[in-house]
Amino acid sequence: MPTSFHEIVFPLDIALKSAGGPERRTDIVSFGSGREERNARWAHSRRRFDAGYGVKTLAALQEVVAFFEERRGQLYGFRWRDRLDHSSAQPGAAVSPLDQPLGVGDGARATFQLMKTYGGTHAPYARPVSKPVPGSVRVAVAGGEVPTGTAFTCDTTTGVVTFLPGHIPASGAAVTAGFLFDVPVRFDTDYLEVDLSAFAAGAIPKIPLVEIQP
């Protein structure tokens, strides 16, 4: 059976002009006293995007239709580059192997999931990263960068860092990483409505995308 995810990036020139962001699901119960009780239904946020804002030419529209057809609508997932949030580094900074904590070694653990942490004062949120950009992952152990391919490998389809024999982090050694990453998404529709007369007049087509767990 073919995989339900294609390791291909949505056209970058279109994605970089899109709209969208994170979504959460919260249950709120209001009491007669005016107080509320709030509970998070999702442990992780889910991002939604509209690629239509990046379609400015007929050629770009045709490119999106071809991409949509190859994905069979909602059937196959793909990579999406979120212009707002695609790096482990602070805004404007270069990627560093010290950017994000992944965990602490115990002398035996060989695998660590790439993570990006948001906030830090009240309730920091650790987001699993499953689609790092190939060639972008840098890893450090106890503050010292270790070489890729010799000390570790990273599966760019899952975001799992695996330390090779002889390089497993010692007990108490902090493991950190820096990377660029994509968001796994799919089209959130099986129908793309294209009105060429409206498009010629400046109307923006709707091309909804939603984050998935591949």
Image (cartoon, rainbow, N blue to C red):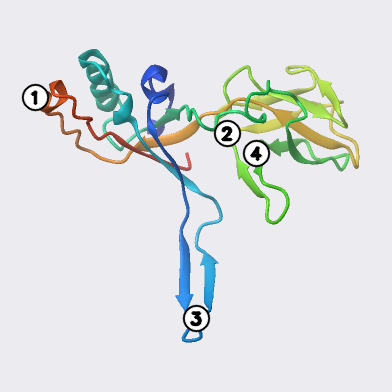
- Kindly check if marks 1 and 3 are in contact, taking CB atoms under 8 A apart as contact: no
- Kindly check if marks 2 and 3 are in contact, taking CB atoms under 8 A apart as contact: no
> Which numbered disc covers residue 34?
3
Of labels 2 and 3, the one closer to you? 3
How many numbered discs, if any?
A: 4
- Kindly check if marks 4 and 2 are in contact, taking CB atoms under 8 A apart as contact: no
The CA span between labels 4 and 1 is 43 Å
- Residue type pointed to by label 3: Gly
The CA span between labels 2 and 1 is 42 Å
- What element does badge 2 sit on? loop
- Residue type pointed to by label 4: Lys
- What element does badge 4 sit on? strand
Q: Quadrant of residue 13?
A: top left
Q: Quadrant of the N terminus?
A: top left
Pick whichever of labels 2 and 3 is earlier in the sequence.
3
Pick whichever of labels 1 and 3 is earlier in the sequence.
3
* Residue to which mark 1 is pinned: 197
Where residue 148 appears, as percent x and y from the top left, is 74, 18
Q: Which residue: 88% across, 32% down?
A: 142
Pick whichever of labels 4 and 2 is earlier in the sequence.
4
Pick whichever of labels 4 and 3 is earlier in the sequence.
3
Of labels 4 and 1, the one closer to you? 1
Where residue 11 appears, as percent x and y from the top left, is 38, 19
Q: Quadrant of residue 92?
A: top right
Query: Is residue 63 toward the left or the right of residue 27 in the image?
Result: left
> Which numbered disc covers residue 130?
none
Pick whichever of labels 2 and 1 is earlier in the sequence.
2
* Residue to which mark 2 is pinned: 158
The CA span between labels 4 and 3 is 36 Å
* Most foreground residue, 79 or 50: 50
